[in-house]
Amino acid sequence: MGAIIEPFLYIIGLLADIYFKIVVVQVVLYWLIHFKVLEPSNKYAQKTVEILDNLTAPVYKKIREKVPPVSGLDLSPFILLLALLFLCRLVYRLSALVI
């Protein structure tokens, strides 16, 4: 039974880890643009922001429906990172039990 579940847990953990990294890159990129380290008129920055927004916007929308911005601060990336971290840890623990 464990041999059947292990690949699925691995794939779920891998996807959660990749998505975690996507959100971190997006947050860092927004901070770089905000503090004028990176120019928003840069075509590569614009395209990267567009791609990252397309990947994360649906999830952020669901989170914002439940948790609105607090004093103008959008907490959805932070909440998503915590949820992904929890998911990665859960998958790691489950895979240790399965083996």
Image: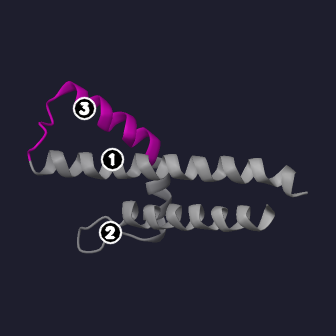
Crowding at dot 3, Cα within 10 Å, few <14 / some 14-19 / many 20+, comes out as: few
Q: Is residue 62 magenta?
A: no
82, 6: nearer the viewer: 6
Q: Which residue is mark 3?
A: 46
Q: Is residue 39 magenta?
A: yes
> Mark 1 or mark 2, which has the lower sequence index?
1
State the image coordinates of residue 52 (x, y, percent, origin top left): 38, 40
Q: Which residue is mark 1?
A: 26
Report, in whole angstroms, how far the alpha carbon at label 1 lies from the one at label 2. 18 Å
The magenta span reads: 36-56
Secondary element under disc 3, as helix, strand or loop, is helix
Residue drawn at x 38%, y 34% is 51
| Left or right, 47 with reference to 18 | left
Q: Which residue is mark 2?
A: 69
Q: Quadrant of the N terminus?
A: bottom right
Choose mark 1 or mark 2, whichever is in front: 1
Toward the right, the furthest residue is 1
| Left or right, 20 with reference to 11 | left
| Left or right, 33 with reference to 90 | left
Seen in the picture, residue 77 relative to 4 is either above or below; the reply is: below
Mark 3–mark 2 CB contact (< 8 Å): no
Instruction: Tell me the amino acid under the disc marked 3.
Output: Gln
Instruction: Tell me the amino acid under the disc marked 2.
Output: Pro
Secondary element under disc 2, as helix, strand or loop, is loop
> Mark 3 or mark 2, which has the lower sequence index?
3
Secondary element under disc 1, as helix, strand or loop, is helix
